[in-house]
Image (spheres, helix red, strand yellow):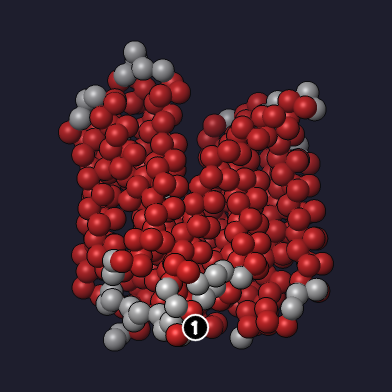
Amino acid sequence: MNRVLLKAAVLSISLLLLAATAVSPAIANISAAFKQVSAQTIMLLVSLPSMTMVLASLVFGKLSESMSRRTLFHVAMLLFLIGGITPYFMNDITMILVMRAILGLSLGLIFPLSLVLISDFFEGGERATIMGLQSVCVNIGGIIFSLLGGLLCVADWHNTFLAYAFGFLVLIFVYFYLPEPPKPQVTANQGDAAKTPLPGKVYFIESVVFLYNLLIFVFFTNVAIQVVGENMGNAASAGIALTMFTGGGLVGGLLFGKAMQLLKNYTIAVGWLLTGAGMALIAGTHDFTLLLTGCFIGGIGFSTTCPAFFVTLSVLSPPARVAFSIALASALSGIGQFVAPFVFEVVSGQFGQGPGRFPLFVSAVSFVAVGVLLLLQNYTQSPSSAKLNS
């Protein structure tokens, strides 16, 4: 087995994870084409995939016990290509939304699968390095789909959906270079995979995953409001801020393997604190350059924390339950992001505040507070958690 091609095949799957963003540049064009449709309905073209993604993630664990990894991938890609490309031929917004829901189902299978495959093929420090590169590929994929969607929609909004033909390249590459991974060795006392209990530490990490995604999503929904609403810049400036976050994410992902070797089981806590530092700088400044610096730091924190979550879950979970624990984390990530706007609307309302700077301030304080608690919690960990250090 060629290890370079194997790594490339595993990582190429992650290029698809932000595919839903391909339609974002075309939202204004689509809205103009469907003048009788409300703006909220048009926005579902972006948000609906994340909702159905959660549903698919919830059943991934069960499917992974009865289907091979390659079969799961092929099913997911069939849904991806149908849900992604078919709207090119449509002029009915309801049917387009149905296809977007199908796209979300495919991403709900692809997301946990991309992480489970890393756990299947790699161990120790190599696993941590590949997990960091996975977050890099996620960001690169987001850039690819955003650029393709923007360029293709110039002539006609229908063309935007042709961006999903990129999936054919990934499908062909993975078909030829990704073998079926070996089945995890399950000891006799573990019994049926579905009955193998998960350690309490796994459920603790799952809850931290949910909270992190709830807090980080505030950045994506509020930074543009702060930049434009407080005259720090225009919509293009807000786009630059988001790009700086992505840039920080690329750097964080590239450095993740080394960072985890150095920080070991403190990686998650440090990631929370880095994210909090970035959010604090964003929420506390009125200077656009400093805001961009905060975005970059926050991106590094994001791409430090998220891979660390999945490395930790893959190490702490019994081999037969790794797929389930990663799928659960994927679902909780989506749920956290989905409920974030509603939670922060209530919190801001309690203090008589609106969207923009205040939610980012609350997020920053929460990140730092939880990060400190996680650091303290590591001092009292049982010796069994030391296997993260290996």
Q: Is residue 39 left or right of residue 257?
A: left
Q: Residue at x 80, y 73 (%)?
A: 380
Instruction: Please say if 171 is above or below 81.
Output: below
Q: Is residue 239 left or right of residue 8?
A: right
Q: Residue at x 71, y 36 (%)?
A: 359
Q: Nearer the viewer, residue 11 or 150?
A: 11
Three-letter code, disc 1: Asn
Q: Residue at x 44, y 40 (%)?
A: 51
Instruction: Please say if 372 is above or below 87.
Output: below
Q: Is residue 147 left or right of residue 68?
A: right
Q: Can I make out residue 27 in this image?
A: yes
Q: Nearer the viewer, residue 210 or 33?
A: 210
Image coordinates for residue 347, horizontal then vertical, percent: 73, 32
Image coordinates for residue 340, horizontal then vertical, percent: 61, 39
Looking at this rendering, what residue extends furthest in the top direction? Answer: 36
Image coordinates for residue 132, horizontal then vertical, percent: 52, 69
Image coordinates for residue 201, horizontal then vertical, percent: 65, 68
The quarter of the image holding the N terminus is: bottom left
Q: Can I make out residue 151 in this image?
A: no
| Residue at the spot of label 1 | 189
Residue 348, picture quadrant: top right
